Image (cartoon, grey):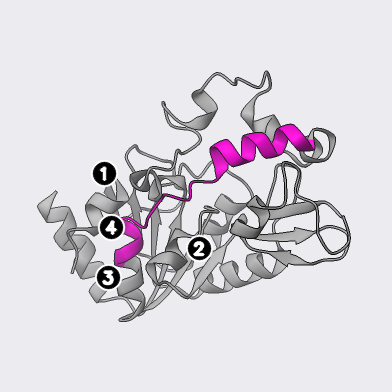
Amino acid sequence: MEIEIERLQHLINTSKHIVFFGGAGVSTESGIKDFRSEDGLYSLKSKYGRPYEEMLSHTYFFHETKTFYKFYREFMINKSAKPNEAHKYLARLEKKKDLTIITQNIDGLHQLAGSKNVIELHGSIHRNTCLNCGAKYNLDELLNLGEVPLCPKCGGLVKPDVVLYEEGLDSNDIEAAINAISNADLIIIGGTSLSVYPASGLINYFNGDKIVVINKTHIPVRQRITLEINEPVGKVFSQLE
């Protein structure tokens, strides 16, 4: 892998505008389960009697709110998780390069590592909003609002600012992501299967000619790939300057 690391380092050093497009595999080294790998969340037999994908839907949230939150607290929140080498490296790189992080993760670990220019396509567990009055609550506040979180100001249901199945992505986030990708001369795709749409379709807006893929397994990319490294993202980034 030494030669691949040298090539990656050269690509980063010679690029002016970099986009890192990351998925669940970026956070697995922090102890957060991904979804679609062999031991990912979707491969587990649901103890709730419903597929986990269904439980993460807009419909399920409103029809089975109590069970949704029980599942959400158990599987989607990991307060002990800390930034790994992938998050830390990107935070350092942002201080040296024009870097935009576009993440499909909702864990907030990029910001915890120190990154500022982060687009969270699927939202964040750290932001929660009352559906009635619009009051905002952080994660700790949400966890103290009861089994089914209700707004202490108006009694309305509080919903995590995460994009559930059947919900659309935020238009401002999409616009910002398209702008960053279309103006980048290097895009690094890391820790994602590129199977979640419409997020994965944003890659098609890349106009440059340097595409790097870092993932434990091979993933299909329509454009010509400059470099592919089939290793965990943190393991790769820990060897960069």
Q: Observer-nearest residue: 9 or 74? A: 74
Q: Which residue is mark 1?
A: 231
Q: Earlier in the sequence, mark 4 or mark 3?
A: 3
Q: Which residue is mark 3?
A: 12
Q: Tell whether label 3 touches label 4 (CB within 8 Å).
A: no
| Three-letter code for the amino acid on which mark 1 is drawn | Glu
Front tag of 2 and 3: 2
Badge 2 local density, few (<14 within 10 Å), some, or many (20+)? many
Taken as a whole, is the magenta stretch helix, strand or loop?
A: helix
Is 101 placed above or below 30 here? Answer: below
Is 66 placed above or below 231 here? Answer: above
Mark on residue 85? 4
Badge 3 local density, few (<14 within 10 Å), some, or many (20+)? many
Spot occupied by residue 135 in the image (x, y as percentages of width and height): 79, 67
Asked where in the image residue 158 lies, by quadrant, the reply is bottom right
Asked where in the image residue 238 lies, by quadrant, the reply is bottom left
| Three-letter code for the amino acid on which mark 2 is drawn | Ile
Spot occupied by residue 103 in the image (x, y as percentages of width and height): 50, 58
Front tag of 4 and 2: 4
Q: Observer-nearest residue: 12 or 155? A: 155
Magenta-drawn stretch contains 83? yes
Q: Which residue is mark 2?
A: 102
Q: Earlier in the sequence, mark 1 or mark 2?
A: 2
